[in-house]
Amino acid sequence: MSYIEIDDVDLHYGRQSGAANGAGTLALANATLSIGQNEFIAVVGPSGCGKSTLLKLISGLVKPTRGVVRVGGQSVKKPLKNVGMAFQNSTLLPWRNVRDNVLLPLEIVEPYRSQPRSEAALKRQRADELLATVGLADFGDQMPWQLSGGMQQRAQLCRALIHEPSVLLLDEPFGALDAFTREELWAVLQNLWLTRKCTVVLVTHELREAVYLCDTVYVVSPRPGRVIASRDVPFPRPRTLDMTYQAEFVELVHACRHHIMPGSAA
Amino acid sequence: MKKATVENLAPWVTTLLLLILWQLGVMVFHVENFVLPSPIEAIQQIWANRYALLQHGLATLSTTLVGFAIAVVFGLLLGILVGSFRLVYVSLYPVLIGFNSVPKAALVPVLVIWFGVGSVPAVIAAFLLSFFPVVVNVATGFATVEPELVDVLRVLGATRLDMIVKIGIPRSLPYFFASLKIAITLSFVGSVIAEIVAGNNGIGNVMLIASSNFNVPLVFAALLVVGVMGVGMYAIFAALETRFTAWSVRGSGLEYPTSG
Ligand SMILES: Nc1ncnc2c1ncn2[C@@H]1O[C@H](COP(=O)(O)OP(=O)(O)O)[C@@H](O)[C@H]1O
Ligand SMILES: [Mg+2]
């Protein structure tokens, strides 16, 4: 049933490094999550609560101190090999043009990696098509620094998806953008996900963003992060910005906010 | 347009002014030429000894370039290792720093004991003086790769070699070329020192013989020749740098309409 399972996981940073008297950081405690195949979930919580750590656990970049992480039924022991990732800051390679940046995963992931050079033209075409779907049709030949922040994030999404990963991990991908650009990109991301389904874990501290995009919102407490609530988002897709101002939507956002800051007036 | 012309002329003008200042100083204070010759005397000496200086200059240039080439290859490889493997970094860095603190001139006599007089000690000295900046710069380029980028590649299943080839090397190229400009000038220092201490050839040797004959103008003539060669090589590597690492100086070269 569930594709990604996080089963009562603790993550303690800096314990192995010989720091005396239990120093180090307990970043995540008793984390339990279960994400269905092709589900889109969001993880929200205050800064430093272990959201990025959760993504690293899923992708196998860090090993749980306690508990098990399973992806596709397999216990994750080392970094997975076919995951798409995007971050808040642009990690495009400044020496490659946009198209070649998008093509990077195909140079690494099998089977694309060992395909003959004769496939190159097809791959280029594929990158261009993907760029076109995010509104970057004419930007393949540009260098990353010639793109605005929002466009760079579009390109980053393309790079994260070109190899059709089964898991897409997004770490505050729109966190550094202005509000208008961010809302534009919500639509872009929703569109990408609707046309090429994969399991998405979106980390964000924008509650509207979480509710707009996902099937389930998980709320994480301040450090040590614990999953303190989960809310299903029932609204039909494709969702629109107008919906975000409707009563049910606003209510759900407030409910999530209330989990994070119980004291604050809803 | 005008600004570019000024910038192109500026270094020549500065050099000329310094030479004039030097000339005036020598004339005004009546400095004896066995203490400090005037630039005109030094240049006269260059002309008078043009064939010898050309021959010895080329000898110095070739030993320098051989030592430099070894330093570049060695420095690049070591820089990649130091930059991409933490254990290599931890175990080697103190040794490298310690080694770089040793005055290499002090090593030349030892090199002579091992390899005899001639161009071998000069090549080695050129190498020893110049590989360090290459190692440090390349390693810096590797070590400062954004951790998020490393994560993106690791979860695609990238190997160590993929990381080095696709990220590390292109990313450290600007650092590498910057280090070449420093390394080439240090190579000259190394080879000339070795030639002075133990050469039978080269500009350093010319200086040694000239100074033992109290021919100070010739010493300065030789110094000028080394300086000119150094600037020339520096210019070549600066040009290569702009050619190969244009992406790292964003915006320059490509003119985009600016608002206002
Ligand atoms: N590599 C690390 N070593 C030690 N502590 C870390 C490391 N990465 C994160 N932490 C700590 O773990 C906690 C959670 O970090 P993180 O997962 O990045 O939080 P978030 O993404 O929610 O802001 C923070 O207190 C952070 O300082
Ligand atoms: Mg984070």
Image (cartoon, coloured by chain):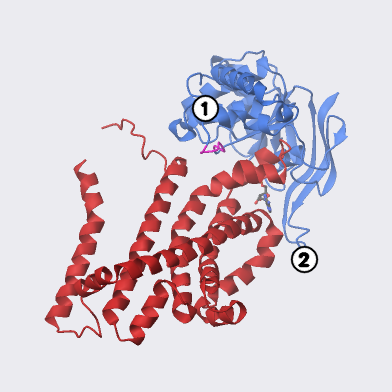
Q: Is residue A223 left or right of residue B115?
A: right
Q: Report whether residue A202 is seen.
A: no
Q: Is residue A103 above or below residue B20?
A: above
What's the residue type where badge 2 is placed?
Asn
Q: Is residue B24 above or below residue A165?
A: below
What's the residue type where badge 1 is placed?
Arg
Taking the spot 22% from the left edge, 52% from the top edge, the residue there is B9
Determine the chain carrying the residue at label 2.
A
Q: Is residue A144 left or right of residue A265?
A: left
Which residue in the protein does label 1 denote? A182
In which image quadrant can residue A83 be found? top right
Magenta residues span A90-95
Q: In blue, which chain? A: A
Label 1 Cα neighbours within 10 Å, binned few <14 / some 14-19 / many ≥20: some
Determine the chain carrying the residue at label 1.
A
Which residue in the protein does label 2 denote? A21
Q: In red, which chain? A: B
Q: Main secondary structure of the magenta part?
A: loop
